[in-house]
Image: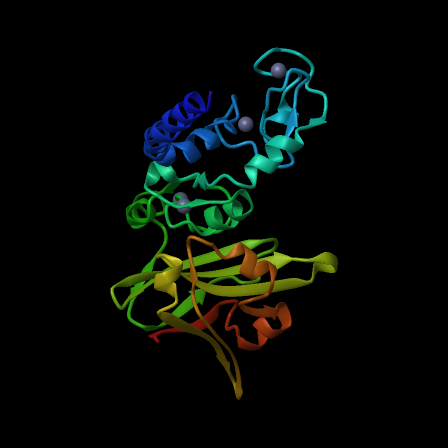
Amino acid sequence: MQKALRKLHSVASMSRPAANGKARSHTPTTNQDLASLFECPVCFDYVLPPILQCQSGHLVCSNCRPKLNCCPTCRGPLGSIRNLAMEKVAQTVMFPCRYASSGCVATMSYNEKQDHEETCEFRPYSCPCPGASCKWQGSLDQVMPHLTHAHKSITTLQGEDIVFLATDINLPGAVDWVMMQSCFGHHFMLVLEKQEKYDGLQQFFAIVQLIGSRKQAENFAYRLELNGHRRRLSWEATPRSIHEGVQAAIMNSDCLVFDSSIAQLFAENGNLGINVTISMC
Ligand SMILES: [Zn+2]
Ligand SMILES: [Zn+2]
Ligand SMILES: [Zn+2]
Ligand SMILES: [Zn+2]
């Protein structure tokens, strides 16, 4: 009896290294296999907490869910059953970045995913022209060719110190003025935006964005200056990258902001000249 037990024991311990070896060779795919359990059957993005399932246990992501009348897998009712076990598992899984197919190799926990993807250098660039009319997206090196082909009317000035002349600033309604400035081997887009607020109050926002990544933008500084008779208004900051765009900065007034009375102080015949100086830091 004791012999038999010992024998069994030794068999078990002999088989253990083999089992371990097998487990180890599977380790690199295990996390990926786990992550694939979270794939939405509709859009193939990941289903992340809070995770809701249908009555039969199928998952669908929170983006697709509101657009569906029934479970895409079994056609049963969607209901609103939380799957707490899958939410627990989700906390242990490293998910690949949404831009993995564009070359990003980063993986991260689900709660870091959104922040990473927002700044991921593999996220496609959108057209940097203000206003949402152009829907173009592409890689950074395609941005300049896009601008020269699709936005031919934008003028470019060479040099680190130029004057951005906005004509007819008294035009009614919301207006954008755009210009390009080339210096230090880079291209910068200068934007002056006029917004009409309540009671006809008009506000102007002027800002500079680099046709480049956020990292590249950190190497530069820009200065915007309005010069008039014994008056000067100036603003200095780091240019935005076109990857983040200028809309958030304009909304937060993180740019040169002035109202139409100030604009009148510096304008001549309805035209406003803004001195733009780019420097390296
Ligand atoms: Zn989905
Ligand atoms: Zn289902
Ligand atoms: Zn990424
Ligand atoms: Zn465009």
Q: Quadrant of the C terminus?
A: bottom left
Q: Is residue 209 above or below residue 53?
A: below
User: Which residue is depicted at the point 63% across and 31% down?
Assistant: 85
Query: Which residue reaches farthest bottom?
Result: 230
Ligand 4 is located in which of the four quadrants?
top left
Residue 7 visible here: yes
Q: Nearer the viewer, residue 181 or 217?
A: 217
Q: Is residue 62 visible?
A: no
Residue, x 53% and y 42% (percent of image)? 110
User: For this view, does 139 lie left or right of residue 209?
Assistant: left
Position above or below: 221 against 49: below
Q: Based on the displayed image, in which of its 4 quarters is residue 73 positioned? A: top right
- What is the x, y in percent for residue 209? 42, 61
Q: Quadrant of residue 258?
A: bottom right
On screen, residue 68 versus residue 186, left or right, reads right
- Residue 275 placement (x, y as % from top left): 42, 74
Residue situated in front as seen by the camera: 72 or 68: 72
